[in-house]
Image (tube, rainbow, N blue to C red):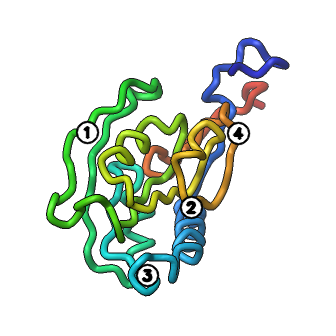
Amino acid sequence: MPDQTRPDRLPHEKGFHISWDQIHRDSRALAWRLDGQGPEDGAWRAVVAVTRGGMAPAMIVSRELGIRTVDTISVKSYDHQTQSEAVILKAPDAGLMRDGAGILIVDDLVDSGRTLELVRRLYPKAHFATVYAKPKGKPQVDTYVTEVSQDTWIFFPWDMALQYVEPYRGRD
């Protein structure tokens, strides 16, 4: 939804910039919330990262919780910054997954919830965790760290580069 005070503002201009330090802190906070919550005496059998955004948080969560079995599920739900129909490109090991019991599925963000809804249909007993959650997607997540508004575009550190930016009012 465009900013009503600036009708020329694009939706992604309401940005929330996440640094590497911030994603690390927030992913560790996610691990802290998940610690001891698994179905097998508090333990998780494995972590499955939703690629690509879930890979860094999943790596941090698996390290913090001492989980050595890590796999990925590749789901395409965006074309650049436009959401599209979610499609699975690569599934995790079927023998590992079964119905998802004891599996921790980690992503960076739940937006509309379509990606996790698709994955949840495949693995209904898995535990779904994201670092950030938007209101529309929250019903698809069991655990998250920070809620952001639906109209906020999150800029993750793996999508950014440091560069000079001109001041709004031009040069001095």
Secondary structure state at the residue bearing disc 1: strand
Task: Tell me the amino acid under the disc marked 2.
Answer: Thr
Tell me whether circle 4 and circle 1 mark residues in contact (CB < 8 Å). no
Sort mark 3 into few (<14), some (14-19) or many (20+) by Cα contacts within 10 Å.
Answer: some
Residue 114 placement (x, y as % from top left) = 45, 35
Residue 141 placement (x, y as % from top left) = 53, 52
Labels 3 and 2: the sequence-earlier one: 3
Task: Tell me the amino acid under the disc marked 1.
Answer: Ile
Task: Tell me the amino acid under the disc marked 3.
Answer: Leu
Quarter-of-image position of residue 83: top left
Secondary structure state at the residue bearing disc 3: helix
Q: Which mark is residue 88?
A: 1
Q: Disc 3 versus disc 1: distance between alpha carbons?
A: 27 Å
Query: According to the image, label 2 marks what residue?
Result: 143
Query: According to the image, label 3 marks what residue?
Result: 65
Viewer-nearest of labels 3 and 2? 2
Residue at 66% from the left image edge and 56% from the top image edge: 146
Labels 1 and 2: the sequence-earlier one: 1
Q: Which mark is residue 49?
A: none
On-image quarter of the C terminus: top right
Q: Disc 3 versus disc 2: distance between alpha carbons?
A: 15 Å
Does residue 76 sit above or below 63 in this rendering?
above
Does residue 158 sit above or below 8 in this rendering?
below
Labels 4 and 2: the sequence-earlier one: 2
Query: According to the image, label 4 marks what residue?
Result: 149
Sort mark 1 into few (<14), some (14-19) or many (20+) by Cα contacts within 10 Å.
Answer: few
Residue 130 placement (x, y as % from top left) = 51, 56
Viewer-nearest of labels 4 and 2? 2
Task: Tell me the amino acid under the disc marked 4.
Answer: Ser
Q: Disc 3 versus disc 4: distance between alpha carbons?
A: 29 Å
Secondary structure state at the residue bearing disc 2: strand
Labels 3 and 1: the sequence-earlier one: 3
